[in-house]
Image: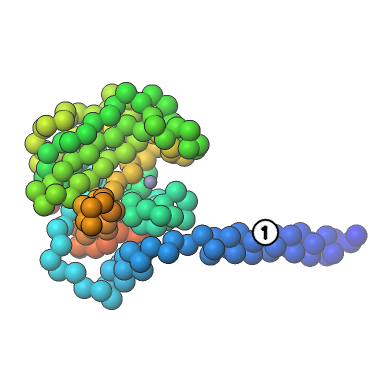
Amino acid sequence: MNVVLQLMHRLFIAATILLSALFLASCSVSKNPLRKTIKLLQKGELKDDTSYVYSLPFEKGKKYRLVQGYFGPFSHKERAALDFAMKRGTKVCAARNGVVVRVKEDGDRGGMNRKYRPYGNNIVIEHADGTRAGYWHLQFNGALVNVGDTVQQGQVIGLSGKTGYAAMPHLHLLVWRYDNNRWEQIATRFRTQKGIVYLKGWKKYKRPDNE
Ligand SMILES: [Zn+2]
């Protein structure tokens, strides 16, 4: 085969792989109606001026990349959750005032396999309106609060890590509301350096210095 033919052959294979990947991805898009609602909120096509404004879950003036957003294509296909890439030991801050209702910090392993899921260290905080926020993948002994503690928005509550089902060190943050006799995940607004927004995957967000 001459060089041109070889090149065309490779391009053909690459295109086939790409198209199959796209096809598979499009088939596995969540049917959850919340996914569409979040898209409209993110675009500003659906206005929301009354819901609670959360703080980004890290220190003032710091900036982290949201490597996976709501209904993200990797592990969030059916989850309204947020993944912030941060190296192990980064200070995690409460996104909202509340009371700590759950702490797990004895997990000592993690990786890109579901078998690690039970090892994911986490803190769950209940807010005044009954919603709860969960902070996942904290490092071993990485919880700096105890069950029953009252915490303030912005308070350092733990240290990030990679315990549980996690491909890389990051903080998985999610908020639930109890409705129709079950816990459901919801999207929330955040205060960022560039205003109050619904966060989008793969963007970097800075928590304002003066928040
Ligand atoms: Zn996640």
At numbered mark 1, what does the secondary structure look like: helix, strand or loop?
A: helix
Q: How is the image coloured?
A: rainbow
Q: 188 left or right of 116?
A: left
Q: Residue at x 14, y 49 (%)?
A: 130
Q: Residue at x 28, y 24 (%)?
A: 141
Residue 60 vs residue 161, the one in the foreground: 161
Q: Is any atom of residue 100 visible in this view?
A: yes
Residue 25 vs residue 1, the one in the foreground: 25
Which percent across, then down, holds residue 122? 29, 35
Q: Dot 1: within a 10 Å radius of its alpha carbon, few (fewer than 14), some, or many (20 or more) residues?
A: few
Q: How many marks?
A: 1
Q: Is any atom of residue 206 visible in this view?
A: no
Q: Residue at x 33, y 41 (%)?
A: 171
Q: 17 left or right of 191?
A: right
Q: Is residue 46 above or below residue 18?
A: below
Using the rendered view, name the quadrant where residue 195 is placed.
Answer: bottom left
The amino acid beneath tag 1 is: Ile
Task: Work out which residue is located at the far right of the displayed protein and give it.
Answer: 1
Using the rendered view, name the quadrant where residue 189 is placed.
Answer: bottom left
Q: Is residue 47 above or below residue 27?
A: below
Q: Is mark 1 within 8 Å of ligand 1?
A: no
Which percent across, then down, holds residue 199? 30, 59
Q: Which residue is mark 1?
A: 17
Which percent across, then down, holds residue 163? 38, 32
Q: 103 left or right of 151?
A: right
Using the rendered view, name the quadrant where residue 44 is placed.
Answer: bottom left
Quarter of the image for the N terminus: give it: bottom right
Which percent across, then down, holds residue 67? 40, 50
Task: Work out which residue is located at the far front of the displayed protein and give it.
Answer: 181
Q: Residue at x 48, y 33 (%)?
A: 115
